[in-house]
Amino acid sequence: MSSGNIEKIRTGPHPLALHVANSTQSWTGAAAAFPLFHLGGMQIHPYLKQRANELRKDLTGHDLEKLLILIMQKAQTRLSDTLAGIGAYQHHPYQRQVPTVPLFRQIGSTEIRDYGTGLTPDAPVVIVVPSLVNPAYILDLKTDHSFMRFLAKQNIRPLLLDWTTPGDEELDFGLEDYILQRLIPLIRAVHRHHNKKIHLLGYCMGGNLSLAAAQILQKEDILASLTLMATPWDFHAGQPPHLSSLTDSFLKMDPLSQNSPQVPTNILQLFFFGLDPTLSDRKFRKFSYLDPKSAKARNFVALEDWANDGAPLSPKVARDCLINWYQHNQTQKNCWNIAGQSIDPGRLTLPGHIITPTADRIVPAASAKALQKKLSRFTYTKARGGHVTMIAGEKAKVTLWHKIASYLK
């Protein structure tokens, strides 16, 4: 570190103590759990019972004392790798730096930015709607790796809706308020400005919000198409068995059960951690072996910075998601009501496209495929990668971006 420069050390992954404690408990407890597993007394996930039984058979005749020592050694190595990976991430020099994008319109704290200024008038116009939970810049991750900037280079005029940090008014918003008072007015404003039908593309829960907006705007005939990427619909399909109890636990937390002004991002990080508690350990162990100067390492840090960033949510939005979606599954049951309408994908008449990743742990394939059944007229694409890497991973430009551009044209 040169004189006069202060190294910026990350404090994530968030919540840091949980990630470290979870890995420590998992690997230090591995040896202690082995005898219980061997004797058949350990509780095994139903999906893994057959594999557990096969493993016990394979252990027959082996020296169990030597196996126990090997397990302890392997567990120690894995914990060390995880901690080394977290440390390498925290000290990595990468910092996101991208050019400022012109602001097209702002309503309250919600902005929409135009990545296609200077394009020809005949360029198709698309509004890209991200999730409310994570920052919008996953779609503009780096100057040399940006979905939005790629579309502009294809002579498609992309506008990115950015929910930003809720202001005083938005802190009292629920999902319906965001759809009716932010998303729909901005769609109308873009349509009036360009005087042409607008393509709408929603990512993750941005797809749910976009679908609702598309149904409400259908009679106005201002949309050209609807594209839904990694969008959940059946919130009970493919989810872990503990989801119900997990949701109940989160609803009892103070920011959700009391009249707190906002729900901190760490509360949301806890919920997603609960959906896949081993993900953090796996990815940081893998990161510990990467060359920190490599493109792969920089891409990992860029994505991890995004995943640990984000603004707090209004309590109403958090409860809408946890109660109406995850707990009551209102979307799949056609009883999610916005502006007095039951949001039903089957009522849409405009053309569209559904994109689901092959390895999504946030939105299980069964949850996203529920939309495919209800929107059988839409074209369907299965994209390589997980929930995030599908659209922002190293290979996304090759595997998906070109397909989306050709569809929008």
Image (cartoon, grey):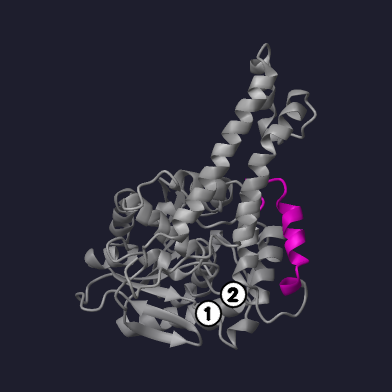
Q: Quadrant of residue 17?
A: bottom right
Q: Which residues fall within the magenta stretch?
A: 234-256
Judged left or right of residue 300, residue 40 is right
Asked if the residue at tag 1 contacts the one at tag 2, i.e. Cβ–Cβ closer than 8 Å, the answer is yes
Determine whether 347 is above or below 368 in the image.
below
Q: Residue at x 72, y 74 (%)?
A: 255
Q: Amino acid at mark 2?
A: Pro
- How many labels sit on residues? 2
Q: Residue at x 36, y 52 (%)?
A: 292
Residue 407 % position (x, y)? 32, 57
Residue 386 % position (x, y)? 47, 49
Residue labelled with disc 2: 312
Q: Quadrant of the N terminus?
A: bottom left
Residue labelled with disc 1: 165
Residue 121 % position (x, y)? 21, 77
Q: Quadrant of residue 51?
A: top right
How dense is the environment of label 1, judged by Cα within 10 Å: few (below 14), some, or many (20 and up)? some
| Foreground pick, 271 / 300 | 300
